[in-house]
Image: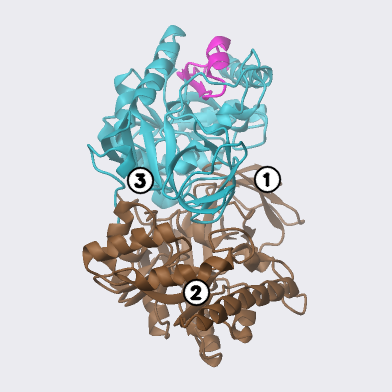
Chain colours: A cyan, B brown
Amino acid sequence: MASPPPARPGDRIETISTPALLVDLVALEANIAGMASRMRASNLALRPHAKTHKSVEIARRQLAAGAVGLCCQKVSEAEALLPSGVADILVSNHIVGNGKLRNLAALAEKVRVSTLTADTEHVAQLSEAASAAGVEIGVLIEIDAGDARMGLMDMAQLVPLAKAVEQAPGLTFRGLQVYNGPFQHLRAQADRARASRDAAQRAGTARDRLATAGIACEIITGGGTGSFAEDAEIGAFTEIQPGSYVFMDADYGRNFDAAGEPYRPFRQSLFVLTSVLRRSTPEIVYTDAGVKALNLDCGMPDIFERPDLVMTKASDEQGRIEVRGSGPAPALGERLKLVPSHCDPTVNQYDWMVAMDGDAVAAVWPVDARGCVL
Amino acid sequence: MASPPPARPGDRIETISTPALLVDLVALEANIAGMASRMRASNLALRPHAKTHKSVEIARRQLAAGAVGLCCQKVSEAEALLPSGVADILVSNHIVGNGKLRNLAALAEKVRVSTLTADTEHVAQLSEAASAAGVEIGVLIEIDAGDARMGLMDMAQLVPLAKAVEQAPGLTFRGLQVYNGPFQHLRAQADRARASRDAAQRAGTARDRLATAGIACEIITGGGTGSFAEDAEIGAFTEIQPGSYVFMDADYGRNFDAAGEPYRPFRQSLFVLTSVLRRSTPEIVYTDAGVKALNLDCGMPDIFERPDLVMTKASDEQGRIEVRGSGPAPALGERLKLVPSHCDPTVNQYDWMVAMDGDAVAAVWPVDARGCVL
């Protein structure tokens, strides 16, 4: 059922069929090592989010660099990544539905599994699935991060909910998660720092309230690529769960650091290689990367090392690129490297990821958990 | 490598794991038969665009209803759909790059293949690939539809380009394509009709210019789900290549017909089934269908038969739905049917499509050409 791979190991970049998802191995390894050493220096556990890459090969590298386990967003995603050797998975989502609850319990027969809740009725469902399978599932309570999303908002319910988890057969209370995705993309560093402090304060308040009731939190998890430095300093978290740092994307590049410079704590390792299909006018070309080869919910991709070019439109299978500088428009067949605006859903478009060593294809990796929506 | 299927034949809708792509078989069959009979009545060939569904099962039904062949947008997509029994494929795109040209030529060993060009350098590349493989590839010249996209704009180049195709070894000149995707989504029927007339006039002018030079067009192709009725009336086209009519989507539903009513010449057959993961407040719920289970370039999906609910945000794996009416918010685990805003890229997110007979699962079909970007 898989689509054909765009290249073979040993190929040169010139012969890769396009559009293709490329990963620069040197940048990838630097990002993995960089985040691992920063978290070690902060005495924080690192639990990378695998929803970004969905790749056994990348998960393996993160674990080898010292990650305590992985975050996954879907049970089927976690299943697909078991060959990485991961032994501790946090499914950082609320798992609802009998089929998925059965699969979650089956996963807990193979590795240590934790997941999230914020609702007593949901706790009963988790408990029933764990009990039926005779397994133990760890449960963290998700605390609202200030955006009325999935987390618990009414702190009066916190202790009763934690007690419900503690008393539920098959469940073990493990702690708290506070995470707000959009906060990672606040443009000014001061705003991200404020959001981090706010999330940490919410987590700290909840932890203290539980402690008063005699309930300890083994794990307080949250944080991401946009705020990890602030998250690490604040001291509320026991672990950080960033995903995008392995790849980075154009949207993170539109954030600013404390000095007002573009936010680039990691290297861009992810690209979509595209070819010019047609030079329509001297200023307009069309490429083979459109909506099905990218994801545009965070805007258009940047064009790597070509400040003279701007992508302005996309149809399902074609992208329109316009010349803004004085240079000539790219020629028929010319290749361009796009920097995806949003890495996670872009990766999820592809069955294959081409691992590049410079301009040579080192390996072609399957995107193992692609399409694992369940 | 495929993700697990969300259901098995015989399952009821209540037990399908979510998010899942559903196809209502009765509506699908009605749409396939409806378009086929309208095109027959207009004496026009119907060449459905398979980029919408990427499904062998649906292609088979379209061919059985009298389609003359299929349009595909990618060579690998065409390859994946060969088991439908299709014998005549128009790859309605400009195929560039040695690997893809080789695959195009290999495809022409199996079925009758045509493709598009608008450039003499590209004609030479097509000819080289066809000659090397010893096959014949049909070529249509794409004429600009008024949006400086992929088509030929300078009509002075038309006859020389057609002659270049005619003289190129391995190539057969077959005719013209004029297509403009965005025109299909002009809201007012009068605007779509005007765009249709304009496209037809461009095609007619080009055809006449070629005829004067002694070059005949076997095929003049174009048109789509938003304009097929006008396209059929105008008389310039020999065939129409609509895709979305098999499924329809919320964006087409935002078009208007001649009477100013919502444009509904076909039935909505495509849905994304989603479950409520959390009722965050009495007015806000979160579901399991986000950016990776939908495609939001045409806006948010509608919520089928629930005018009291509006989807307002999506993260990668979650959707936020807000209550606008007086009714209660959906409960934990409650299922909702979303009407995707843009059918083609939504289908391309999924490995599986659940064919529904009412509320029973009739079959689970692979999305055979999913991810076939090459």
Q: Is residue A44 magenta?
A: no
Instruction: Name the side, left or right, on which A213 lies relative to A317.
Output: right
* Towards the viewer: A260 or A136: A260
Image quarter where the C terminus of chain B lies is bottom left
Q: Are marks 1 and 2 in contact (CB under 8 Å)?
A: no
Chain designation of label 3: A
Q: Which residues are magenta?
A: A213-239
Instruction: Name the side, left or right, on which B224 lies relative to A2.
Output: right
CA separation, marks 3 and 1? 27 Å
Instruction: Quickly name the residue at label 2.
Output: B176
Give the residue displayed 25% in from the left and 70% down from the top: B135
Q: Is residue A236 magenta?
A: yes
Instruction: Quickly name the residue at label 3.
Output: A103
Residue A260 in the image, given as x and y percentages of width and height: 66, 16
CA separation, marks 2 and 3? 52 Å
Q: Residues within 10 Å of mark 1 (few under 14, many from 20)?
A: many
Residue B288 in the image, given as x and y percentages of width and height: 52, 48
Say whether residue A13 is visible. Answer: yes
Name which residue type carries label 3.
Answer: Asn
Give the residue displayed 64% in from the left and 63% down from the top: B251
Chain designation of label 2: B
Chain designation of label 1: B
Name which residue type carries label 2.
Answer: Leu
Instruction: Quickly name the residue at label 1.
Output: B284
Give the residue displayed 63% in from the left and 86% down from the top: B233
Instruction: Give the mark nearest the N terminus, 1 or 2.
Output: 2
Please tell me the numbered disc located at residue A167.
none
Image depth: mark 2 or mark 3 in front: 2
Residue B247 in the image, given as x and y percentages of width and height: 53, 70
Q: Secondary structure at mark 2?
A: strand
Image depth: mark 1 or mark 2 in front: 2
